[in-house]
Image (tube, rainbow, N blue to C red):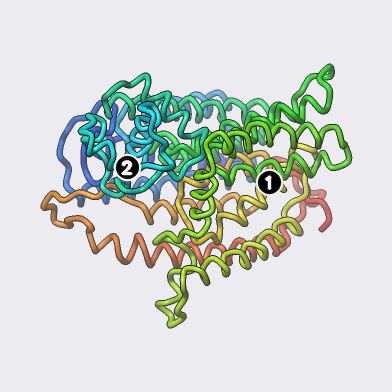
Amino acid sequence: MSARSRWVGTAGLAAVLLSVGLGVFACLLGPSNTVPQSGGGWSLKADPSALLVVVLTFAMVGFGALGVCLCLLALRWGWRPSLRLLLAGGLGAALVYALVPVGGSTDVQSYALYGRMLLLGHDPYQTVPQLLIDLRDPVAKYAPQAWRRTPSVYGPVSNWIFAAAAWAGGASMYAIVSLLKVAAFGAFAVVALVLDRIAGDTTARIRAHLLWTCNPLMLWACVAGAHNDVYGAAFMALAFAVFFRAGARTPVWAAGMYAGALIGLAGGVKAPFFVAGLGLAWVARRSWPTLAGLLGGVVATGLGGYLLAGPRAFEILADKAQDVSPTNPWRFLPRWGVELTYGQMNQLGYLAGAVILGALLWKLTPATTRQGQAARVSFAVGAALLFVSPVQHPWYDPLIFPLLALAPATRIDGLTQLRLAVGSLGFLPGVPQFRGDPWPDPMPFVRDPVNNWWTSAGLGILAVAAVIVVLLPERRATETDSPAETGVPALAGK
């Protein structure tokens, strides 16, 4: 380990720690422009100003992106921190986030409402949270304004998890949200432990923890925000573990079926997680029993879950595919005089996604193991889906980060982290408040230039950069390069 790599790695970990500290502090301050009312956990109830909250959350994103990129660079140069320290530190930070109020979003409160509706016998795909308000249900007292007239847009497995939390939490938004945060912590920990188990050698495991367990932006999205995508990531990681670590006595069709069932559950959380099964299908393409088991498992739990939820679940899914979010790579084009309808944005997204998918499958670093090959294919499809989608939310990225951690290391690691940072800025501080602050909501200084236009332009630029970075050949390891100097194995010929 060189002195250079040690200093860069130490600086990266310091930035990661500072980022987590800033995020936790922003949540601890209590209800604000980043913490909703009745957001669970314990807080100081300090009534912070919008200016302070903006500074804390934006600095959290900046230091988080810088820290992870520095650590990845140091790892490439030969830095080897303690695996136990990374795992324990990351899970410790996740536990702290689970015990403080929700940060950066009101989505988890909508989860509580949909779970409460399902528990009371109302179909969350057919009804809206306004029903609970009209019924004077105590949970609806803190219903977010943005979700009151919107039916559930989540998969059936998500709604069942929400209902379980509502059952355990009773008629209390605070209790239900607190339980959902603990559940999010559990799912995050499952992914961290699975990656530690199956990622590969020491270097690969360190990289996996940097991308997931110790990644402040993943911690913020998955645990602080308690977004349900983390449940999909947990099922997906378990599917890879079952598929590639099945015992010798397990028939190949059974390993495929178990993995397929887990992929189906992941897709039942959110439909995009079904793409993770494509990598498994690719490596099993020459084994018909494995493919049959895999498909059967996906159909049983994935399609079966949506069928149980009813036809409206499919209609909601189709409608969601046509959405356009304020922060998307195409929304900046009208500023350049290119007028686009939402339908045209979707069409451009599909076309650009095909280009990115082709580039990733053609030139992304080849894998030497079946697991790496599967992760590489699934990551390529997931990244193509997310990088140029007109629907952009940073908490969608738990779909691709575990897959990236299991695929071979490339320069796209850092670029993917930068993309997550830019996307995160588009949704901070995250909670509308009308409190007479110097920047009262919608805080035009932040909302218009940063949340919408700058983020849109940044995501578009990074999508182009991803294609360029992948197509450019990486420096090959030479006979004079030691593994400590390269940090990654020599690339296969392309």
Q: Nearer the viewer, residue 412 or 397?
A: 397
Identified by mark 2, the residue type is: Thr
Q: CA distance from mark 1 to mark 2?
A: 30 Å
* The C terminus - image quarter: bottom right
How far across and how far down the image is residue 324, in percent? 45, 61
Residue at 36% across / 37% down in the picture? Answer: 108
- Can residue 485 be seen here? no
Q: Is residue 238 left or right of residue 482?
A: left
Mark carried by residue 106:
2
Identify the element where label 2 is drawn.
loop
Mark 2 is surrounded, within 10 Å at the Cα level, by few (under 14), some (14 to 19) or many (20 or more) other residues, namely many
Mark carried by residue 378:
1
Residue at 76% across / 23% down in the picture? Answer: 246
Is 303 located above or below residue 478 in the figure? above
Identified by mark 1, the residue type is: Ser
Mark 1 is surrounded, within 10 Å at the Cα level, by few (under 14), some (14 to 19) or many (20 or more) other residues, namely many
How far across and how far down the image is residue 200, in percent? 71, 32
